[in-house]
Amino acid sequence: MKKLLLILVFLFGFQVHAMMDMATNQELEDFLSGRDLKMQRSFMNNMIAIGKNLEFSGTSYEDVILFGITINFNGISNKDVYIAGDTVRISGTIKGNLKVMARNLIVENCEIDGNVNIVSPEILMADSVRCKNSTKIWSRDIQMGGHYKTVHIKTRDIIFTKNIEIKDLFVQSQTKPSLPINVLKHCNFKYEPPIPQKAQIFFSSKFRKLYSFLSLCFPFLLMTIITPRVLQETIEIIEKKPIWIFFSGILLLLITPLIMILLMVTVIGAPIGLILLTFYISLLYLCRGFTCIALGRIILFKLKESKLKLILAIFVGTGVFVLFTAIPKAGVIVQVPFLVFGFGGFAVGRIRMFLTLKKQNLI
């Protein structure tokens, strides 16, 4: 554990040094974080901002990436814009593509040259919006006006204003929307009802189980080819010391988020925190597979040790795991120990590997 903390301290110090170098060159300050940010100047490089309340009213000559709770984009972007937040308001000029994910979205007085992709439960597209290329929207309730070239919409309910102009329109909703008469004359309109109920049942049960099974098997099948030693060592650790690995896994699952939170609340540590958060979330999903393989090896204990046994253990253990998690009330109960054992085994194995390499002066 001390060695792991030393690694984090080293990375933290490296980030401090990087930020000090950035202070000497104004053009490299393309990452901003804080509670309330107002961006009103020109940005020559890619601009990334993370905070609670963000307001962009400047000019960007590269991509703009905004993450926050309340976001107001009212500027000029010469390239793409990516926004993820709770309440988002967009206006201004975007010469590239626009991708938005929000809970509540308002777009007005906006001109977009590139493609538009929007995912939001509630959307208001004002009459002053102009999208010159393809527009794709996934929503629950939409009120839409403006000028568009090609629009694909999947929603529950949608209302078109009288001042809307669309060349090609495809809508998938519960009820067929009504378009103004003047729009129907010049619009290639296609409507499609939602997926039939039988198909919904198929995709929500059988397909979901098959996807869960294959998505867990595939990464570990690759590991048998690319990193077989890491896979074998992790499984052996879980099999030989299950009690110690279980409690170590619980401890590491609690400590890791705390370390990431401490990093993310600081300005210079936020990038490291985001990188660790991405890796942590991915590992939480994948680490269950290590426990599945250990379970599969127990079931196939009579087979001779070989690569074939390992591959069979991947399929058998994962299959048993997916079947148990499909039981409504038993799903969570099964997920927890698989997660703890898998995370503990992988983390302890990597710490051991680091200590061994350190002892041999290889790092």
Image (tube, rainbow, N blue to C red):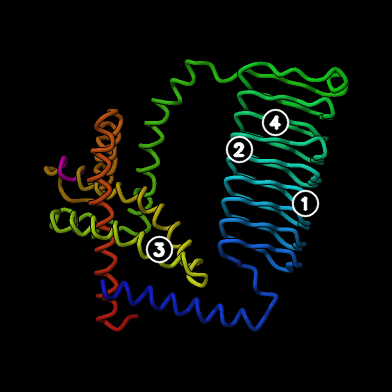
Residue 299 magenta-highlighted: yes
Which label sits on residue 260? 3
Q: Which of marks 1 and 4 is nearer the N terminus?
A: 1
Residue 232 seen from this side: no
Q: Which quadrant holds residue 105?
A: top right
Q: Name the residue under label 2.
A: 120
Q: What stretch is highlighted in magenta?
A: 296-300
Of circles 1 and 4, which is in front? 1
Q: What distance separates the C-alpha of mark 4 from that of mark 3?
A: 39 Å
Kind of residue at badge 4: His
Q: Which of marks 1 and 3 is nearer the N terminus?
A: 1
Kind of residue at badge 3: Met
Asked if the residue under mark 2 is in contact with the one under mark 4, i.e. CB atoms within 8 Å, the reply is no
Give coordinates of residue 351: x percent, y percent. Answer: 27, 68
User: Label 2's element?
Assistant: loop
Residue at image location 68% in from the left, 25% down from the top: 158
Residue at image location 60% in from the left, 24% down from the top: 156
Quarter placement of the N terminus: bottom left
Of circles 4 and 3, which is in front? 3
Residue 206 vertical position relative to residue 220 in the rendered view, above or below? above
Q: Which of marks 4 and 3 is nearer the N terminus?
A: 4
Q: Name the residue under label 4.
A: 152
**Dot 3: within a 10 Å radius of its alpha carbon, few (fewer than 14), some, or many (20 or more) residues?**
some
Q: Which of 72 and 210 is in front in this view?
A: 72
Which label sits on residue 94? 1
Give coordinates of residue 281: x percent, y percent. Answer: 40, 52
**Dot 4: within a 10 Å radius of its alpha carbon, few (fewer than 14), some, or many (20 or more) residues?**
some
Give coordinates of residue 120: x percent, y percent. Answer: 60, 38
